[in-house]
Amino acid sequence: MSDSSHDVLILGGGLSGLTLALQLKQAMPELDIKVLERRVGPAPLAAHKVGESSVEIGAHYFSETLGLKDHLDSAHLRKFGFRFFFSEGERDLSSVTELGASRYLSTPSWQIDRGIFENHLAEEVTRQGVQLAAGAAVKRIDLDESQGHHVEFEAQDAQGGAPQRQTIRAKWIVDASGRASLLKRKLGLAQGNGHHANAVWFRLNTRLDIDNWADDPQWRQRCDPAARWMSTNHLCGAGYWLWLIPLSSGAHSVGIVADADMHPLEGMDTFDKAMAWIAQHQPCVHEVLESQRDTLMDFAYFRDFSHGCKQVFSPQRWAITGDAGMFLDPFYSPGSDFIAISNTYITKLIQHDRAGESLRMPSLFYGEVLQSFYQSTLTLYEGQYPLFGSPRVMPIKVLWDYTYYWGVLCLLFFQDRLTDRAAILELHEPLMRARTLNVAIQTLLRQWGQGTDAHAATGASLRDDNPACMLDQASLPWFAELNAGLRDKLDDAGFRQRARDNVAKLEQLAGEILGQALRDVPSLRTQLPDGLLPAETRELLFKMAA
């Protein structure tokens, strides 16, 4: 058994572990970092992983924080935003409501081929002096803050002989092992969250050009560029959504994410079953996929994928990042966002430690803020899947969710305020007001969706039940400006004012949403639960709605 000592040992050389290693090296070049990765050799192109679609926080982290913009621009696809089609049971996409932007908005994001990206990250961290051990299977972890944590692992030698047992000592240990969740399992930190959904996905070695799926020339010309295929396309129905994500290697990712009760996994847990399910629910997709069966590259599924973690940062110099700790849902692609936030907190904790500062308060504060982000984002999914097929309510939900995300979470990350305890405490009141509003609006959306379902069950229909139109997010000036404003460089006073202005926008939007909901379903006025909102907030919203 060999024995080596390092400043930081990262368990897992995937996306979360490699980005953390790179961020640590850039912040503290003197750090001695070792990464243990179970996989041997480079990741395959079109790697069999969920997480190709990045959104603003994760994209900013990769491109600006880590300095990888040139690689993203040259080796991956610029994402044409999110796009939604309410196409349950339909064969013609031009005949349904489409939600998306007709042009690129200002703040970029990318469709990331995880194989290409992780191989580039591995090369970059190795170039910067990080030790990357491949084919390393962790066998034992002993946490010891005073003497250094010990990890035993097995790895083949360079000649490919029998695996050799090795021991590593490290001052810091970070679990980035993904679903293996090595530290979470060891410490009994697993935590359910009440959101029960499943996913199946596969890759086809072909390009799915959604822009040619309809014959209507006007429909094709609604977007500039005419490149809907570069969006993260969501084809939606009650209780589920189907994704289409292009990869720069030429493959296309296809996935189904569904409420576990409304669309059980057993009905789609093989490729043939999934195809039969798609034929029933999204015939416009099935027709194209059926002709490309021979390009199938892989197939996988996750049951009950959403999970939390009781603790992710410890003053005893251990931490958990990425899927090893918590994962919410592929909808809105928040996985890379939470990697970015967790890694930023871990980097700051190690900086505190190397400066001789106590870790007790920072680890507690960063953990509480991260859990607050997690809980706020969870409300976007809990009980919301029945809405996904509603062309009446779902576009408004997406508009709200984006406004909350850009106006609050993105603001903190883009302005580098995640670890600014003084700024967050100073803005505690408006930030909590925004969080309370978000919970209230998510509850309202659920009840509104139920009300429109009941209305339709009577044989009546609302005045715009899935018309053939495009709801163009780029045509909303305030929405496009909110996206563009993410990249503004703000001083302290400007940041505080922007935060308050964004919360005021949320309050105004909440009042308008409530007004529309009450016009559709007047009985909601008496159905909203007492105590859902503070009295003054409730009064303000009803005043705005009027």
Image: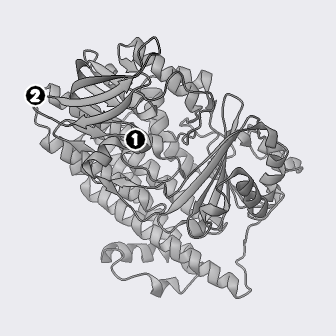
Q: Nearer the viewer, mark 1 or mark 2?
A: 1
Where is residue 543 shown, x and y percent of the image? Answer: 43, 76
Of residue 399 and residue 390, the one placed in the foreground of this image is 390
For residue 356, the mark is 2
| Amino acid on which disc 2 is placed | Gly
Residue 415 horizontal/vertical position (percent): 36, 37
How many residues crowd around disc 1 within 10 Å: few (fewer than 14), some, or many (20 or more)? many
Q: Earlier in the sequence, mark 1 or mark 2?
A: 1
| 290 sits left or right of 171 in the view | right
Q: Residue at x 48, y 54 (%)?
A: 305
Q: Is residue 308 above or below residue 490?
A: below
Mark pair 1, 2: CA separation:
27 Å
Of 117 and 234, nearer the camera is: 117
Does residue 227 appear to the left or right of 369 in the view shown?
A: right
Secondary-structure class at tag 2: loop
Q: Position of residue 354 (x, y in %)?
A: 16, 25
The residue where tag 1 is placed is: 322
> Could you tell whether 70 is left or right of 407 in the image?
right
Where residue 198 is drawn, which disc sits there? none
Query: Can residue 296 be seen at all in this image of the molecule?
Result: yes
Q: Find residue 525 and report its horizontal and vertical position in percent.
A: 48, 84
